[in-house]
Image (tube, rainbow, N blue to C red):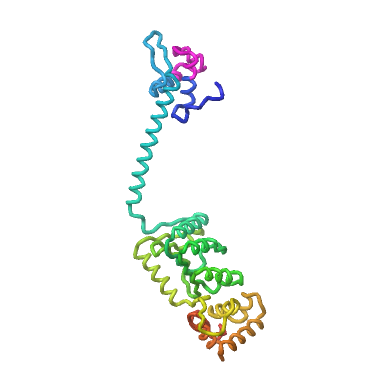
Amino acid sequence: MDDNAGLLTVLGVSTEEETVYRALLAHPGSTLAALADATGWDRARVRRRTVALEDLGLLTRMPSRPLRFAPAPPDLAVELLALSRREEIERARIGAARLAEEFQAAPAPAVHVVRGREAVAQRLTRAARAARNEVLVLGRVPFLGGRHELAHELLARGVGLRAVHRPAELDSAEELRAVRDLVDRDAQARVLDAIPLELVIVDRGTALVPVVLADELAVVELRSSALLDGYVALFDLLWQRATPLFPVAGSDSGTVLTRSDEEILALCAAGLTDRTIARRLGVAQRTVERRMHDLMDRLGARTRFQAGLRAAGHGFGGDPCGGMSTGRDSATSNC
């Protein structure tokens, strides 16, 4: 056969049926034996194809002995096949619409588990991108991936973002400045030592809890339920207990805090020692000590505690050195 063989497959005609149809077009009125000779097949095989072609309307039986076949004109036959296929597609489209209605009407399961690192990342990302009002985050969540592009996307759309971090998550100057960048884009960030789990809550209607099941990363997705309400209440409680990082500075005081000043106070808020603050900012410990003394002088404070209180007058909501429950002794934190 020629290079055009198989052109009718899109209309529901198999390649073998098309082979017989083309042989009949070349020799109208052929008998079963003649078609078998033309195709090189046995008569039983040809007979099955002629029955199928007759059902499709591509041939008719002639009133003769021996039995002969007449092909339907290609233009008319193809048009009829195309019309039939369009009707099938329309029926399928209507059926799909009905299935979609049934799916939307069915209540979604309250708990759903997604397994596998890639599937988890996709689900977390998809859920966050569906947010309309606010995304709440506890701990270090896989979808951020340390890059924060998705967080930038949410904030650019006007979606609120509130996150509570563990001090260990601010372990480098780069990560601390990345969080500061999010705050500059109107996110809100706080720090708390006692965060029991990672958690993402979208519009207070969906909670996603990353877990490890049988050494495989998974996420448990919760929808409207008492369990979801419990996770929302947990976030609200931890948010109230956490200490703000980089709040918006006010303008009442004559002392202006630089970004570097606020970084030092923020790490002090996390209950960190001067040595740890120096390591995370990539500077010497003596530099941190000197900067802290300078901040105390500029804020008119005789102690670090007073410096924290007076920094609150610049918008630093809360006591940066004493207002957060870290579970460590205050002497250990140098605050």
Q: Which residues are magenta?
A: 22-46
The relative height of residue 257 versus residue 300 in the rendered view (above or below) is: above
Front in this rendered view, residue 253 or 132? 253
Q: Taking 135 as reference, is 306 above or below it?
A: below
Is 221 left or right of 309, judged from the image as shown? left
Q: Is residue 304 left or right of residue 284?
A: left
Residue 278 drawn at (x, y percent) = 63, 78
* Extreme-top residue of the structure: 65
x and y percent of residue 95 in the render?
35, 40
Q: Residue at x 38, y 15 (%)?
A: 61
Q: Is residue 185 above or below residue 34?
A: below
Q: Residue at x 64, y 85 (%)?
A: 290
Locate the C terminus and report the quarter of the image it occupies.
bottom right
Residue 120 appears in the figure: yes
- Say whether residue 41 is magenta: yes
Residue 329 visible here: no
**Which residue is nearer to you in this view: 25 or 156?**
156
Q: Does the magenta run of residues contain 201?
A: no
- Give the main secondary structure of the magenta stretch: helix
